[in-house]
Image (spheres, helix red, strand yellow):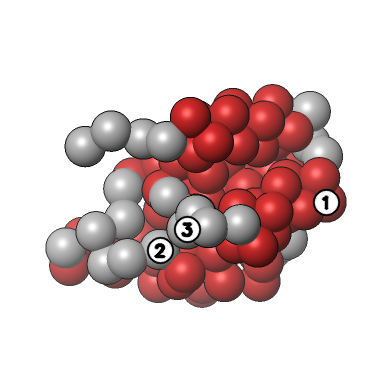
Amino acid sequence: QRLAAGQVSFGAAISACATCAQWRSSLRLLQCIRDGDMRPNEISCSAAIHACSHEGLWELALALLHELPKARGVVAYNGAASACEKGARWQTALGILEEVVAK
């Protein structure tokens, strides 16, 4: 499956924002994907989840996780669990782990 150049560029930009803990910029870029003719893919959503995890924004991270199809990868789950850990939501992180194990 070939990715459109736009998906690759947006994914790279969102990843760069995540690395710099710029969660607002990550979410804005993700919204740009939605506003265009593309759908966020696992790479772009996982990067945005990672950006949210830096700040412990577990609710946003979970919303992004559940936006992905059921075939979510370990990177997305790990980012969401990390956000829950930083947000002191260990029960929610445990639920994420249980969801991964059930797959």
Q: Looking at the picture, does residue 95 appear above or below residue 30?
A: below
Camera-side residue of 6 and 65: 6
The image shows residue 85 at horizontal and vertical percentages of 61, 55
| Residue corresponding to mark 1 | 24
The image shows residue 70 at horizontal and vertical percentages of 27, 67
Q: Looking at the picture, does residue 44 appear above or below residue 36?
A: above
| Residue corresponding to mark 3 | 39
| Residue corresponding to mark 2 | 68
Upstream in the sequence, badge 1 or badge 3? 1
Upstream in the sequence, badge 2 or badge 3? 3
Camera-side residue of 35 and 74: 35
Please, what is the three-letter code of the amino acid marked with disc 1?
Arg
Asked whether residue 12 appears in the rendered view, the answer is yes
Helix, strand or loop under label 1: helix
The image shows residue 54 at horizontal and vertical percentages of 73, 43
Question: Image quarter for residue 62?
Answer: bottom right
Residue at x 36% of width, y 35% of height: 3
The image shows residue 99 at horizontal and vertical percentages of 29, 68
For marks 1 and 3, give the one nearer the viewer: 3
Residue at x 61% of width, y 57% of height: 36
Mark 3 crowd level (few <14, some 14–19, many ≥20, 10 Å Cα): some
Q: Quadrant of the C terminus?
A: bottom left
